[in-house]
Amino acid sequence: MTKADIVNAISRKTGVDKTSALAVVEGFMREVMDSMNSGENVYLRGFGSFVVRKRAAKAARHIKNETTIIIPERFVPTFKPSQYFAEKLRNSLNTKLSAKNAKKGRK
């Protein structure tokens, strides 16, 4: 699903014009990015958390030169779904998988 698909779905389901829906989606994304860039985590109850994590420095191999390089520590954005979200997704996918297998005659 792309940003355009999300905007179209929001517009269709809420009756809001696409321009307004696009402004809201882009505003949301901008706020999440700004918060994370300033080191703050974003918590959305029932959905999940956008968290800034620190990755430690590590050694890696440069295959062409056959040398070891050091990758410095860095901060990376991560998303952790809420327990409700993860459970709902698991149930939905298990139901779809069961239906698909039943259709093929598998157990």
Image: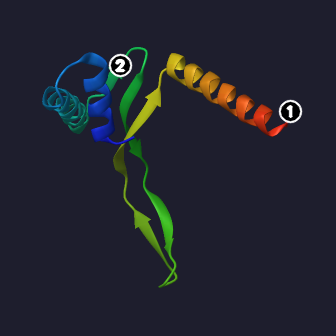
Query: Relative to residue 79, is residue 28 drawn left or right?
Result: left
Residue pointed to by mark 2 = 44
Colour convention: rainbow
Decide: few, some or many residues near mark 2? Use Cα within 10 Å; few <14, some 14-19, many ≥20.
few
Amino acid at dot 1: Lys
Amino acid at dot 2: Leu
Residue 49's place in the image compared with 71, above or below, is: above
Task: Residue at 56%, 20% (x, y): give it.
Answer: 88
Query: Relative to residue 30, is residue 67 drawn left or right?
Result: right
Disc 1 secondary structure class = loop
Q: Quadrant of the C terminus?
A: top right
**In the foreground, 50 or 18:** 18
- How far apart, in angstroms, are the residues tagged by discs 2 and 1? 38 Å
Residue 11: image location, x then y, percent:
25, 25
Q: Which mark is residue 5?
A: none
Decide: few, some or many residues near mark 1? Use Cα within 10 Å; few <14, some 14-19, many ≥20.
few
Label whose residue precedes the other's in the sequence (2 or 1)? 2
Residue 54: image location, x then y, percent:
38, 42
Residue pointed to by mark 1 = 107
Residue 76: image location, x then y, percent:
36, 45
Residue 68's place in the image compared with 16, above or below, is: below
The image quarter containing residue 57 is bottom left
Query: Relative to residue 58, is residue 44 drawn left or right?
Result: left
Task: Residue at 52%, 82% (x, y): give it.
Answer: 66
Disc 2 secondary structure class = strand
**In the foreground, 4 or 26:** 4
Residue 16: image location, x then y, percent:
19, 20
Task: Residue at 26%, 35% (x, y): give it.
Answer: 36
